[in-house]
Image: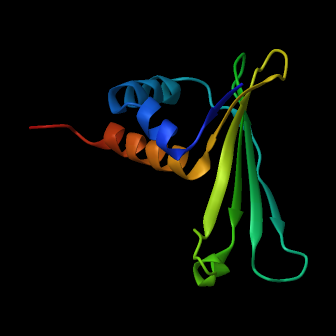
Amino acid sequence: MLVFDADAVHATLAWPLLIEALRIAHLGEMPASDVVLQSDPRGSGNQFVTLPGWIPGGLIGVKMVGVFPGNAELQPPQPSVQGLVAAFDGATGAPRMVADGAAMTARKTAGDSALESPGPP
């Protein structure tokens, strides 16, 4: 199983490679997906979100995100949104990869934006 911290995510997902992979992915079938939202039973306002998706004939991906608005007030401060992305083999269920969720989200969001840009004039 591969493990990627934030630095490894940014180093591994080169923009040309990522943008082309996203372009191809957007042409394919949408993954079967669901969202599970769990709120802190103590009423703190903290939440944990699980977003699984299963690509037909391919990977199972799960994004797990904690949303803790008060983290900025901690000493030392921490990000309010933290998480992981995990990928599993769609045929066997075996874990294949775990990566820093904030870095993966930043890369995907920027890559999707690049797909929408018309490019240089």
Write the residue at 70% across / 24% down: 59
Q: Quadrant of the N terminus?
A: top right
Residue 53, how many percent across, how many down? 72, 36
Q: Quadrant of the C terminus?
A: top left
- Which scheme is used to colour this image of the protein? rainbow
Q: Is residue 84 left or right of residue 47?
A: left
Please tell me which residue lies in front, 75 or 43.
75
Write the residue at 22% across / 39% down: 118
Task: Tell me which corner region of the image, top left, top right, bottom left or bottom right, holds residue 13.
Answer: top left
Q: Is residue 118 left or right of residue 95?
A: left
Residue 29, how many percent across, how many down? 61, 25
Write the residue at 76% across / 51% down: 50
Task: Tell me which corner region of the image, top left, top right, bottom left or bottom right, holds residue 117.
Answer: top left
Residue 97, how many percent across, how many down? 68, 30
Q: Is residue 109 above or below residue 29?
A: below
Write the residue at 57% across / 42% down: 5
Residue extending farthest to the left is 121
Residue 91, how many percent across, how many down? 81, 15
Q: Is residue 71 above or below residue 93?
A: below
Q: Is residue 97 left or right of residue 15?
A: right
Q: Is residue 9 above or below residue 101?
A: above
Please tell me which residue lies in front, 3 or 103.
3
